[in-house]
């Protein structure tokens, strides 16, 4: 019996214990996660937290559920990859066979790297891709090494010890993501990008990509959550996509599942059948595995990497206010920018939040001679300025951390040689939908040439 079109059709069928073990315990009274939350809302920035004793009710309602990334006994590691189609956002759900088969080369690279380090994660299949989750115990050598990775000037003042460890985790997960992208770009038919950076049309004329989505590491630990297996995946419906695209009744409801003794294609078939899901719940544990020794090898690989040196150089620069940045570089550095960047500075609310626009701003200001961390200061100043009507958008988040994460990510890729800048041109910006020319002579070529010739 397939799951019907109503979320109420999600009977729990005995898999509530599996949900609880993913929360870090064998009963609701001894779980280790900080909170559970409903996810897949129309505005993903809004976190709707619930007390743990509402779990049964939320499961019976077929609610999309997530658990906190923060944990009282462990440091959780989480990697998310997913298929993104900018021209047909519903395609991962209308044609999941394509979405998952085209990701497989990237999954192969991830598994090769994890095997090299000796990490065996819990592997989940979601609506658009894969989650890989593992943990290290608090108080372990790995946790101490993660805290020791934090570079002076990296952590925001006054944060908790858990947030400091999270800052170290952020660095190794960025390294992991760079390794994945570097190794999978030539294996995958479509672009492989860090986070959901917009891309232009590929060989088939479609703007599609595989996203290595490490965006959660650009926000405070306390604000982030990860999807719970054996619970409903409601994003197409809750986001409004189904009704807006007229797809009511054309996509069956399904749940997030562990990849247990099956491949992704078999899992896609299993996830819509209530009896198959119940059978899987009898034999597939979703306890998040302790992978301390493998994580220590990952930490050491990062310590020995070129990226570690780039990160250290990034944080050599002090944080500056917007006024200090203008005084240091002069007006020309920030005013001599193409029309698309001018538009983003004038209307940052939403536009500048897009990873593709932060990437473009980073490229142009690097070309103008600005240091990477000062570029982050410029973007953070826009995020923090109340005149742009941010409202409660930053209530659970940090403008400085968000800006630093993306600028560090994009500038590091250039320094590593992992960003060949092939889309740093006007035609690509137009194809992505990020072109606002300032005049008939608006052209990105001067900034492209300057950046290509500048040592980063």
Image (cartoon, grey):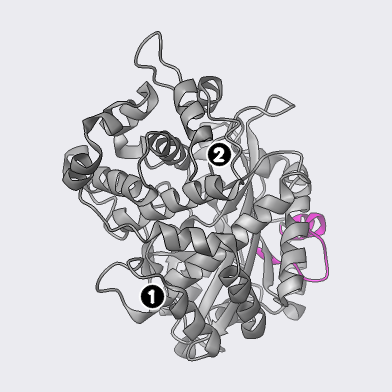
Q: Could you say which quadrant of the image residue 358 lies in?
A: top left
Residue 176 picture location, percent across and down: 61, 62
Residue 257 forms part of the magenta stretch:
yes
Numbered circle sitting on residue 164 = 1
Residue 38 picture location, percent across and down: 45, 62
User: Are there few (<14), some (14-19), or many (20+) residues within 10 Å of tag 1?
Assistant: many
**Marks 2, 1: nearer the viewer:** 1
Residue at the disc numbered 2 = 242
**At numbered mark 1, what does the secondary structure look like: helix, strand or loop?**
helix
Quick one: 253 or 26, which is closer to the camera?
A: 26
Report how far apart the C-alphas of labels 2 and 1 lie in the structure: 40 Å
Residue 101 picture location, percent across and down: 79, 47
Q: Is residue 407 visible?
A: yes
Residue 91 forms part of the magenta stretch:
no
Q: Which residues are magenta?
A: 256-271
First of labels 2, 1 by sequence position: 1
Residue 311 picture location, percent across and down: 46, 60
Q: Residue at x 75, y 65 (%)?
A: 111
């Amino acid at each position: 019996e397939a799951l019907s079109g109503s979320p109420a059709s999600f009977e729990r069928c005995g898999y509530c214990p599996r949900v609880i073990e993913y929360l870090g315990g064998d009963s609701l009274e001894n779980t280790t996660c900080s909170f559970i939350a409903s996810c897949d809302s129309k505005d993903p920035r809004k976190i709707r937290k619930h007390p743990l004793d509402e779990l049964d009710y939320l499961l019976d309602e077929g609610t999309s559920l997530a658990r906190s990334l923060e944990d009282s006994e462990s440091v959780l590691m989480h990697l998310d990859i997913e298929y993104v189609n900018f021209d047909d956002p519903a395609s991962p759900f209308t044609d999941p066979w394509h979405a998952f088969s085209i990701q497989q080369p990237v999954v192969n690279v991830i598994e090769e790297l994890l095997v090299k380090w000796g990490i065996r994660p819990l592997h989940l299949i979601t609506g658009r891709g894969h989650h890989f989750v593992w943990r290290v115990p608090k108080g372990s050598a790995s946790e101490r090494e993660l805290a020791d990775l934090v570079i002076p000037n990296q952590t925001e003042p006054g944060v908790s010890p858990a947030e400091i460890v999270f800052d170290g985790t952020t660095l190794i997960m960025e390294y992991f993501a760079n390794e994945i992208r570097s190794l999978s770009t030539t294996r995958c038919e479509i672009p492989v990008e860090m986070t959901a950076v917009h891309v232009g049309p590929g060989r088939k004329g479609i703007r599609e990509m595989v996203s290595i989505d490490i965006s959660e590491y650009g926000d405070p630990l306390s604000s982030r959550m990860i999807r719970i297996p054996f619970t409903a995946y409601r994003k197409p419906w809750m986001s409004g996509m189904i009704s807006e695209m007229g797809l009511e009744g054309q996509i069956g409801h399904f749940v997030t599942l562990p990849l247990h003794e099956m491949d992704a294609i078999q899992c896609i078939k299993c996830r819509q059948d209530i009896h198959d899901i119940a059978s899987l719940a009898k034999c597939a544990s979703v306890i998040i595995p302790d992978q301390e020794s493998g994580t220590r090898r990952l930490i050491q690989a990062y310590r020995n990497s070129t990226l570690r040196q780039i990160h250290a150089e990034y944080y050599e620069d002090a944080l500056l206010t917007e006024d200090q940045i203008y005084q240091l570089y002069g007006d020309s550095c920030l005013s001599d920018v193409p029309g698309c960047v001018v538009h983003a500075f004038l209307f940052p609310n939403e536009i500048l939040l897009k990873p593709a626009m932060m990437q473009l701003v980073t490229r142009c200001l690097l070309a103008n001679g600005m240091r990477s961390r000062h570029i982050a200061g410029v973007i953070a100043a826009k995020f923090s300025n109340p005149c742009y009507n941010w409202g409660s958008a930053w209530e659970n988040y940090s403008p400085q951390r968000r800006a630093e994460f993306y600028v560090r990510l994009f500038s590091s890729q250039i320094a590593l040689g992992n960003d060949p800048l092939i889309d740093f041109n006007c035609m690509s910006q137009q194809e992505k939908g990020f072109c606002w020319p300032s005049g008939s002579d608006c052209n990105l070529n001067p900034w492209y040439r300057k950046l290509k010739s500048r040592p980063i």
